[in-house]
Amino acid sequence: MKNQSIKISLVQSDLVWENTTKNLENFDKLLTEIDNETEIIILPEMFSTGFTMNVENLEKPLGKRAFDWLKDKAKKLDKIIVGSILFEQDEKYYNRMFWMRPDGSFETYDKRHLFSMANEHKIITAGNKRTIVEYKGIKFLPQICYDLRFPVWSKNTYDKKNDTYEFDTIIYIANWPEKRKQAYTNLLKARAIENQSYIIWVNRIGKDNQGIYHSGDTQIIDSFGNILKQAEKGKNKVVNTEISIEKLKKHRLSFKVGMDWDKFSINI
């Protein structure tokens, strides 16, 4: 691994229910708070609509305007932008996370674990593969909200022969309610420690159309499980932060728990 750090901006925001125009306008304003040196901007889950399954209420083609906005904004700001969109492809709907580069190229991750208690599984098609994205020698694993509860899906691996890890940072974007805050507060730290990786958490704030409140608690956690930086509860806020591969490398060298990780494969 190279001695490298990356500046990242985490954007915590309220979301206007099923109103792409208002949401994109709000993010236009919030992105003016981005540090000029930021290289990666991360938005919440379903940033353009909120966590709705009412596809009949949304403009068609579903997700196209938010996708075009991501592409245009990444180019204008000359930064990578990450966020998920309720997206339609081949007559199927996906909770799709985009890693959009300034040149218009992108990677995607489709949410694997669908929240059946909100009927997400009845509308959305589950993803069937993990995605690893590398930037400046740092490898990122994109994940979405409910995926946090399933540690096997986000388990890191270590290659003894080459002394390499599958990823260095997990990105979780979410619409996770405050009433289940205890769950994500503990699970985020567990994922950091068990995978010896950074954890980035970007969650929405405010009440959704069901009256469910979200406090956000957007944060970055190091591989020891320490919160390095956290957004103020319930506030529209941009958290400008950074991750250092050198600090992570030192931790892994001093405590090489990866050598004893179990080996397994996942059947989809």
Image (spheres, rainbow, N blue to C red):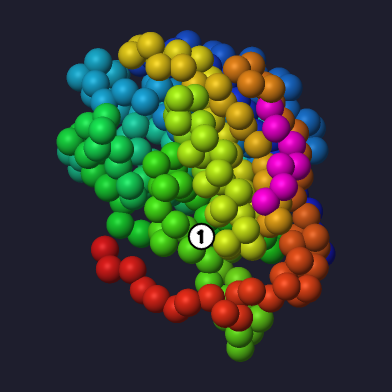
| Highlighted range, magenta | 225-231
Task: Determine the residue located farthest toward the bottom in the rendered image.
Answer: 161
Q: Tell me the residue at 53%/72% (across/down).
A: 157
Residue 174 seen from this side: yes
Q: In this view, does 148 lie to the left or right of 34?
A: left
Q: Is residue 210 left or right of residue 134?
A: left
Residue 74 seen from this side: no
Check residue 119 for magenta coloring: no
In which quadrant of the rendered image does the N terminus lie?
A: bottom right
Q: In this view, does 122 lie to the left or right of 112?
A: left
Q: Tell me the residue at 69%/63% (across/down).
A: 137
Q: Which of 54 and 73 is in front in this view?
A: 54
- The picture quadrant where one finds residue 180 is top left
Q: Nearer the viewer, residue 204 or 254?
A: 254
Q: Tell me the residue at 30%/38% (across/down).
A: 115
Identify the element where label 1 is drawn.
Answer: loop
> Vertical placement of 215 versus 95: above or below?
above
Q: Where is residue 178 in the image (x, y as percent from the top left)?
A: 49, 24
Q: Residues within 10 Å of mark 1 (few under 14, many from 20)?
A: some
> Vertical placement of 265 versus 202: above or below?
below
Q: Where is residue 117 in the image (x, y as percent from the top left)?
A: 26, 33
Q: Tell me the residue at 60%/71% (across/down).
A: 165
> Vertical placement of 86 versus 258: above or below?
above
Badge count: 1
The residue wearing badge 1 is 132
In which quadrant of the rendered image does the C terminus lie?
A: bottom left
Q: Position of residue 231 (x, y in %)?
A: 68, 27
| Residue type at numbered disc 1 | Ile
Q: Position of residue 160 (x, y in %)?
A: 61, 85
Q: Which of 252 and 24 is in front in this view?
A: 252
